[in-house]
Amino acid sequence: MESSGAGDDGDPVADLRRWEDSGALWRLLQVDGSRATVGLLTCDGGEEVGRLECHGPELVRFLARRGGNDDGARTRWPDP
């Protein structure tokens, strides 16, 4: 799994967890095979402030099912 555009550790799950824990929102923008693009949104969901590129079939399937955290529900992240 690789990421770009968010954290420096290259772990998209950790990046999205931190983003969500800080109260900000994220939304799946595109899925292309085993690659997904996630929009990183402001806390009110009104503005995209970054993007995260995620790779790996399991993570992409998870993101495709979840779609984002803008529905008010906490994300149940997959185990590392």
Image: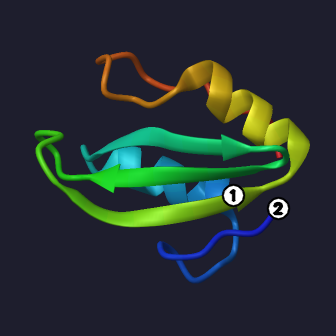
**Disc 2 target residue:** 1
Q: Residue furthest right?
A: 57
Work out whether 40 lies above or below 49: above
Residue at the image point whose x is 50% and y is 39% from the top: 28
Judged from the image, the secondary structure of the residue bearing numbered disc 2 is: loop
Q: Is residue 64 left or right of residue 22?
A: right
Q: Is residue 21 left or right of residue 34?
A: left
The answer to whether marks 2 and 1 mark residues whose Cβ atoms lie closer than 8 Å is yes
Mark 1 Cα shell of 10 Å, populated few (<14), some (14-19), many (≥20): many
Which of the 4 image quadrants contains residue 48?
Answer: bottom left
Image quadrant holding the N terminus, namely: bottom right
Give the residue type that dot 2 points to.
Met
Q: Residue 23 bears which disc, if any? A: none
Question: Residue 27, how many percent across, how many down?
Answer: 41, 39
Q: Is residue 28 visible?
A: yes
Name the colouring of the figure. rainbow
Q: Residue 54 bears which disc, if any? A: 1
